[in-house]
Image (tube, grey):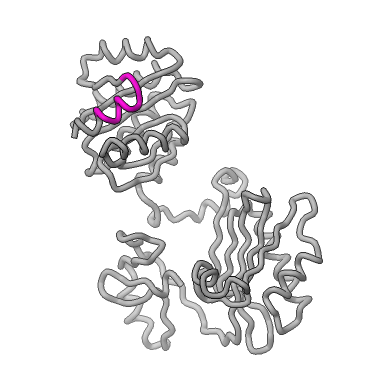
Amino acid sequence: GGRGLGKFTNGLQGGVHIIKTDEVEDYASKMLGGTLITKQSGAAGKPVNTILLAKKMQLAREFYFAIMMDRTTQGPLIIACSEGGTSIEDLAESSPEKIIKVPVSFDEGLTDEKVMQVVDGLTVSGDKAAAADQIRALYNLFIAKDCTMVEVNPLAEDVEGNLIAADAKIGFDDNAAFRQKDVFAQRDTTQEDAREVAASEFDLNYIGLDGNIGCMVNGAGLAMATMDIISLNGGSPANFLDVGGSATTTQIKAAFEIITSDPAVKAILVNIFGGIMKCDIIAEGIIEASKELELQVPVIVRLEGTNVERGKQLLAESGLALISADDLDDAASKAVAAI
């Protein structure tokens, strides 16, 4: 899988090792504090702060099992395969006929019929009733803990035919943090982009990218369009940042701090279409952030919508060297030219 095929920056190959007890210290010293690069982590890799030690199990067979939300059926979808231990993408390419998909209705729940469909699809050789109970338990976990994904890979059989969740990955719905406090208290922010962590503290949606034009936009759709227009004008967006429809001047200032924390950013494009979000509030935030942060990069501002004239007036009277744009294409071309 991902970790097993990964490589540490210090040269150690693999993030999963089967070793003897007297080798633990040697391997742990090479892994702890290191950086592991996998297909999922990207070139920067992820820091290794914790090591999980587990007793080696005698596994006779390995399966793949997962539950995730499906847009098509608008409900949970169980994916199972009679082969496991590697990524589902590889399995889909090598053995697509062995993968089964079982949609579950929120209204009906996981019926006995669908449970047995999964058990049969896994080709369980042991106690099928016990296997069915484990499938139900995993589904109940998915529902009770507001999961977005429960992936058990491998879901394995031991030599006696008992099912064992040998490894698992679980994702949780951020919107359910208020009622899953015990789960979210275990969040490890060291595994996340520090800018994305800071953004979440201010209810901002931020994703770092590889470009050099910072973007601050209200609305995910407009943010995507803004990045596309920047690219069409020959530029490269440095981030996705959606301030939402009710941002305050404090959030706007925080957004600027997060964008400018990226040393690659050479210009900032602010694109606001004021509906619920008023342009004068954005303008006040831009002015406050520009003064307090002493921004050293050009800021291109395109405002449209509610209180737009008041917003433009505030920017014009601020005395700041802000670049005004008439429309999105004009803003993008000025941002690219400003670098």
Q: Is residue 8 above or below residue 75?
A: below
Residue at horizontal 53%, vertical 76%? 85
Residue at horizontal 38%, vertical 40%? 240
Q: Is residue 322 left or right of residue 66?
A: left
The spot of residue 84 in percent (x, y) is 56, 76
Q: How many marks?
A: 0
The spot of residue 239 in percent (x, y) is 34, 41
Prevalent SS, magenta region? helix
Residue at horizontal 39%, vertical 65%? 39
Q: Is residue 282 left or right of residue 331?
A: right
Q: Is residue 289 magenta?
A: no
Can you tell which quarter of the image residue 170 is in?
bottom right
* Closer to the camera in the image, 6 or 184: 6
The spot of residue 156 in percent (x, y) is 61, 79
Q: Is residue 190 above or below residue 315?
A: below
Residue at horizontal 34%, vertical 66%? 37
Q: Is residue 297 above or below residue 124?
A: above
Q: Is residue 332 magenta?
A: yes
Q: Is residue 300 above or below residue 153?
A: above
Q: Is residue 68 left or right of residue 222?
A: right
Considering the image in quadrants, where does the C terminus appear? top left
Q: Is residue 60 left or right of residue 120?
A: left
The spot of residue 193 in percent (x, y) is 36, 50
* Magenta segment boundaries in residue numbering: 326-334
